[in-house]
Image: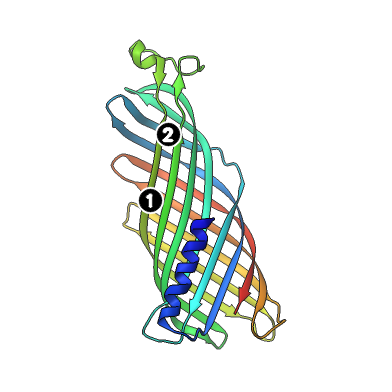
């Protein structure tokens, strides 16, 4: 939580140096009820440790926190700024192989924290109730992966064709990485005239033909016209993140999808 607050505070300070007069500041937070699906196959090996096998998600639904902040200033040649945070969690089984032989299932967990830093420009800014933004998203993913060990007391840990030394214990694997990924950012919004309802969608996307990552959202929000200075709002939407991977030692697809809902403040 401290990292989230620090990131958002840094964004606000950065924007304040660009202009002392904000045209608009918006912020929101809520919960994304996401269900993972898919599988990844890997052939990564290093001496005794083998990660040959296939990870399959258990498709267990979980509620994850998200937060965002949008800062728009009146200087036309300097990009506006949007900051986002979301966490993802996943668990499943990793079917492990040693020298081509099935070794057993390792319970596996994947935790991801994503920080999105998005400088963007307005192509349309509530022109005839339509807003269109385009920009670059730097998505920083902090991932923690834990693949549990397989011991000889495990039902599926013994197999033919491998020496007893390897047979007796297959070690655990843990990985913590921070990876920045650049994505194209596109957002569209329509304010429905004579109402306080807005309809919005955005996408973050990158592909090289073999590997594709996208983060797609669509939502409806309602603003309570209580004060001209601070306006609270609520939002409800649907979000899908997908990772299609095809590299030398890893291939497959993981998807996280589900409804989200939260509260907003407009300044």
Q: Crowdedness of circle 1 by 10 Å Cα count: few (<14), some, many (20+)?
A: few
Residue position for label 1: 178
Instruction: Tell me, yes or no, if residue 161 can be seen here.
Output: no
Figure check: 221 above or below 43: below
Does dot 1 land on a helix, a strand or a loop? strand
- Splitting the image into 4 quarters, where does residue 145 fall? top left
Q: Badge 2 is on which residue?
A: 54
Q: Is residue 176 left or right of residue 129?
A: left
Residue displayed at 36% across by 52% down: 179
Q: Nearer the viewer, residue 49 or 251?
A: 49
Q: Residue at x 30, y 31 (%)?
A: 45
Task: Please identify the quadrant where the N terminus is shown.
Answer: bottom right
Relative to residue 136, is residue 106 drawn left or right?
right
Q: Nearer the viewer, mark 2 or mark 1?
A: 1
> Considering only order in the chain, which callout, 1 or 2, is on the residue closer to the N terminus?
2
Residue 129 pos. (x, y %): 57, 85
Placement of the C terminus among the 4 image quadrants? bottom right
Q: How far separated are the C-alphas under marks 2 and 1?
A: 23 Å
Give percent across and percent down for residue 266: 61, 77
Which SS class for mark 2? strand
Left or right of 261? Residue 202 is left
Q: Residue at x 40, y 57 (%)?
A: 140
Give the tally of numbered discs: 2
Which of these two is toward me, 55 or 73? 73
- Expressed as whole percent of the image width and height from the top left, the position of residue 113 reads 48, 52
Q: Is residue 42 above or below residue 62?
A: above
Local packing at callout 2 (Cα closer than 10 Å; few below 14, some 14-19, many 20+) is many
Q: Are marks 2 and 1 in contact (CB under 8 Å)?
A: no
Colouring rule applied to residues:
rainbow
């Amino acid at each position: 939580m401290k990292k989230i607050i620090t990131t958002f505070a840094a964004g606000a300070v950065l924007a304040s140096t660009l202009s002392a007069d904000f045209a608009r500041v918006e912020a929101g937070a809520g919960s994304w009820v996401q269900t993972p699906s898919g599988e990844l196959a890997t052939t990564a090996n290093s001496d005794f440790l083998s990660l040959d096998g296939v990870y399959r998600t258990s498709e267990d639904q979980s509620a994850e926190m998200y937060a965002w902040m949008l800062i728009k200033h009146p200087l036309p040649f300097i990009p506006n700024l949007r900051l986002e945070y979301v966490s993802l969690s996943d668990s499943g089984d990793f079917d492990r192989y040693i020298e081509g032989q099935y070794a057993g299932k390792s319970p596996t967990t994947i935790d991801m924290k994503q920080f999105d830093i998005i400088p963007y420009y307005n192509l349309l800014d509530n022109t005839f109730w339509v807003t269109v933004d385009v920009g670059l998203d730097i998505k920083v993913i902090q991932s923690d992966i834990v693949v549990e060990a397989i011991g000889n007391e495990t039902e599926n840990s013994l197999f033919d064709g491998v020496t007893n030394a390897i047979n007796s214990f297959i070690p655990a694997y843990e990985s913590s990485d921070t990876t920045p990924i650049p994505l194209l950012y596109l957002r569209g919004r329509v304010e429905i005239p004579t109402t306080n309802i807005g309809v919005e969608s955005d996408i973050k996307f990158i592909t090289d033909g073999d590997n594709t990552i996208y983060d797609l959202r669509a939502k409806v929000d309602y603003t309570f016209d209580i004060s001209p200075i601070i306006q609270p709002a609520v939002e409800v939407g649907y979000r899908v993140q997908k990772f299609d991977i095809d590299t030398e030692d890893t291939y497959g697809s993981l998807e996280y999808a589900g409804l989200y809902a939260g509260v907003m403040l407009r300044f």
